Image (cartoon, helix red, strand yellow):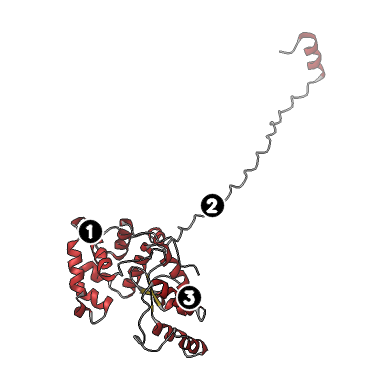
Amino acid sequence: MNFAGKALPLSDGDVRTIAGYLGCHVAAVRAVIQVESAGRAFGNDKRPIILNEPHVFYRELGPDAKRDRAVREGLAYAKWGAKPYPRSQPERYAWLKKAMTIDEAAALKSCSWGLGQVMGFNHKVCGFDTVQAFVEAMKYSEGAHLYAIARFIVSKGLQRHLKAKNWSSFAKGYNGSGYAKHGYHTKLAAAYARRPDSEKITPLPASEAQLNALIGKPAPHSAPPAPAKPVPAPKPTQPAPTAPEPAMGFWARLFAALFGRK
């Protein structure tokens, strides 16, 4: 799999689309991006920023020969933190490619991806039937990364907290029970407060076409109109028969011949 994609940057229109989808202020989405995102979505090589989680790979493989091989090759272990993470993106992609030779889907599910560092195993709650489809979208644009974040927010029922600007409840649901220790709720509130008043509005609900555009999915083409059925040519009309003139008797014919018919 080639992990370099279009890597389109995030636009104001993308943010407005997601705010319309979530039913919250544009400024609230901007605050989430600032506080909850990795800061970078793509490397200079246009590959999404990833982080490997070998303990997740261990879990995804399950107890079989594949897991045994992954453990032998140092690609999987049972508990988080058993080994330090690879530091560079080339090293992380090298891990991923090796892991994919054991089990492609499990390897892709065992990485966090892009702007929101959403785990691949969340692909279904993010709106993708397969992890491969999820990764293709992550290659496409930062708008797709924001779409995945938004779908994850909805799956947790957290959009109502964004709408109400209840930063503590949102941070607890998004970051876990330790949110206060790291000050996520206060960071979100401060980030929102810094946004301009022009962003403190809720756009109209996003359409399916707008959401599909974020992930590079073409809008469905309307079926071409059915060809018109040929109209049969009208049948030629026959002239109405004229009533025959009444037959003339002998004296009438003689009279007409001598004097002309009146």
> 246 or 92: which is nearer to us?
92
Q: Quadrant of residue 213?
A: bottom left
Q: Quadrant of residue 233?
A: top right
Q: How far, Cα to Cα, is label 3 from label 1?
A: 44 Å
Q: How far, Cα to Cα, is label 3 from label 2?
A: 43 Å
Pointer 2 or 1: first along the chain: 1
Residue 226: percent from the left, percent from the top?
Answer: 57, 51
Q: Say few, some or many: other residues with alpha carbon within 10 Å of mark 1 (under 14 / 14 to 19 / 20 or more).
A: some
* Residue lying at 49% horizontally and 90% vertically, measured from the top left: 68
Question: Dot 2 corresponds to which residue?
Answer: 224
Q: Which mark is residue 180?
A: none
Q: Quadrant of the C terminus?
A: top right
> 248 or 166: which is nearer to us?
166
Residue 232: percent from the left, percent from the top?
Answer: 65, 43
Mark nearest the camera among 3 and 2 is 3
- Secondary element at tag 3: helix
Q: Which mark is residue 201?
A: 1
Q: Is residue 54 above or below residue 88?
A: below
Left/right of residue 33 with respect to residue 148 in the rendered view? left
Asked if the residue at tag 1 contacts the one at tag 3, i.e. Cβ–Cβ closer than 8 Å, the answer is no
What amino acid does circle 3 point to?
Answer: Lys
* Residue lying at 45% horizontally and 61% vertically, measured from the top left: 217
Residue 37: percent from the left, percent from the top?
Answer: 30, 69
Mark nearest the camera among 2 and 1 is 1
What amino acid does circle 2 point to?
Answer: Pro
Left/right of residue 54 with respect to residue 15 in the rendered view? right
Q: Is residue 243 above or below residue 167?
A: above
What amino acid does circle 1 point to?
Answer: Ile
Q: Quadrant of residue 196?
A: bottom left
Question: Dot 3 corresponds to which residue?
Answer: 97
- Secondary element at tag 2: loop
Asked if the residue at tag 1 contacts the one at tag 2, i.e. Cβ–Cβ closer than 8 Å, the answer is no
